[in-house]
Amino acid sequence: MAVKKGIGFMDRCKELLDELNKEVSGIRPKEYEVIEKKTFMVPMEDGKKLYTRIFFPEGIKKGTLTFQRSCYEFQVPVFEWMALKMAERGFISGYQLCRGIGASEGEWEPFANERRDGICTLNWLQEQDFADQIGLYGLSYGGYAWWLTADALPPKVKTMVIAQAGIDRYRSIYEGGCFRHDVYTAWAIENAGFDLAENYPRCCQYRPFLEMDEAFLGKKLPWFREWLLHPDEEDEYWRKGVWGPLKEVAEKITVPVCLLGGWYDHHLEGMFYAWNHLRDDVKAESSFLIGPWIHGLQNCIDAYPVNDHEHDSIFGFNEAFRHMDSFFNDDKKTVKGLQGYVIGADRWVKEENIRICDKREIRMKYHDISVDGRKRGSVFIHDPDRPIEAVGGESMLYAPPLLRGVRKQVSGAFAQKDDRILSFYSDVLGQKLTAAGSIRVVLDVTSDVPDTAVVVKLMEEFEDGTAYNIRGGASTIGYRNGAGKRMEDYVPGKVVFMKFDLWPVMWTFQKGSRIRLDISSSHFPEYHVHTNTKGLWAVQDKTRIAVNRVDPESVYLLLPVGEPANEDQPAISLRS
């Protein structure tokens, strides 16, 4: 089974239901009572049967069906609530538990059976007389379940809503050769049926990490080990099996999609990849909404107040309903194109209403300070047994909510005295400045070890000295500059050029602020802690301390500066 149904899970489910009940007032009122709920055991190709529930509005025996699949048994009360609220507004609605989950038969293995079982389920729904047409909805794993079938949809399926799930699995798991512990190690433990509190995050420092599962859980997790053993993007593992076809599916979709993403969700890059690879005709009828959200679509911004709640949608339900309602009942109201929430401006902007006026080069300056009477120099130390704890970030999932998203950072004065961090600053901004797209960080690095990690953290520091993270990035020297496989060419003492293309964002800097860039070698447990040795990270059991250096004259940003667009100056993609 995927997840143990314990007290902690039920508390989380109750919190979700409380939030959903608060926000359901944002959609149109209910019109129907729901007196009929049917349970089906739907047969798969191998004879295993999957638990499926359908809710029928009173008096409606045939109509539009909304449907989702999930591997999270503890969220069944949420799925029941969603189906009920859909049915109260005229939709036949239901859900299915994946293979091996709850009352569904078979053995659950993450992702392995979702395409086959999903297609079989869709074909079963296609044959049901009660479904005239079908709209699919999925959040996170449920979104993956539909991505994996999206090139084989039967005729009745007319649209899909996919929230917080991308199609580039490699880049969801790895960034620059750095493994995302706070998403995938924690997820693996929880979904293997173990108590997370007893194991995480201390298990992430076990070495060699490949053997962590046996050491902490008492058994091997073969599917998890596959992720650890294949850190090269060019590896065949990511080109075949489940992941290769998944990455190619967007260009094969023939129905409009509604994508719901968050600026601080770990699937954002994979969702941009999907959006940018939709066929032109499909994209013209589709939408992509990116909010100030973490994974559950909760607001996560504390640098600025978020007063524009037009698209607030815990678990994506409100937006999923609005899309289904407008798509099936009033197509004139269907929102199309990309819309993003601008942090710092507190407004939603359509992509076609903003343009990139330039990629502005901003030189970042390092101010050397004296510590105990000696100049620091542009040196930062990386001791694998003394990593920097992550506060704020776009690829965390299991950290406490106050450590995810946009969060207050340590003061610049404190950071300057920390031998693990270098802080660089822009000049004071003389006017407001909106970044709209991917910010590039450029620097030259030297290390005294054969390999190490470099982590960059971009933030806005206000006039009063408070600072908040905007974007972060990480890479080992071996995987620098987007290398598809690990390079073994580094010699200690050699200067190497490194660039970091951070995930897209829409952020308005205030007049009087400074842009701050912190450079270090760790951000734990967002990323794995580098041992400062060469080779496959997951099998390393020895560590050493690294002395790393940045050339202070080399550090700059390329900032995509956005302004309102007009006919003479058309908008361009946020991804450019």
Image (cartoon, rainbow, N blue to C red):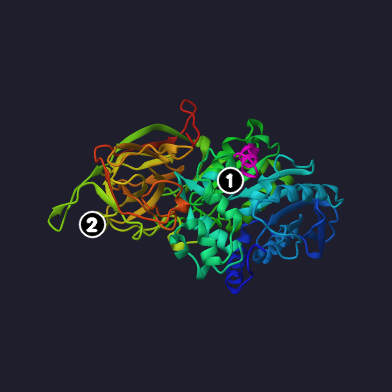
Residue 325 in view of the camera: no
**447 sits left or right of 81 in the view:** left
Given residues 469 and 58, the one toward you in this image is: 469
**292 sits left or right of 561 in the view:** right
- Residue under label 2: 417
Pointer 1 or 2: first along the chain: 1
Three-letter amino acid code at disc 2?
Answer: Lys
Considering only vertical position in the picture, is 208 above or below 11? above
Considering only vertical position in the picture, is 75 above or below 475? below
Q: Residue furthest bottom?
A: 7
What's drawn in magenta, residue-wise? 239-250
Given residues 376 and 324, the one toward you in this image is: 376
Rendering coords of residue 256 (x, y %): 68, 40
Q: Is residue 226 magenta?
A: no
Rendering coords of residue 123 (x, y %): 81, 47
Q: Residue furthest top?
A: 568
Tell me the SS state at disc 2.
helix
Residue 85 is drawn in which quadrant? bottom right
Given residues 14 and 376, the one toward you in this image is: 376
On residue 166, the disc is 1
Q: CA distance from mark 1 to mark 2?
A: 39 Å
Tell me the SS state at disc 1.
loop
Three-letter amino acid code at disc 1?
Answer: Gly
Considering only vertical position in the picture, is 201 above or below 171? below
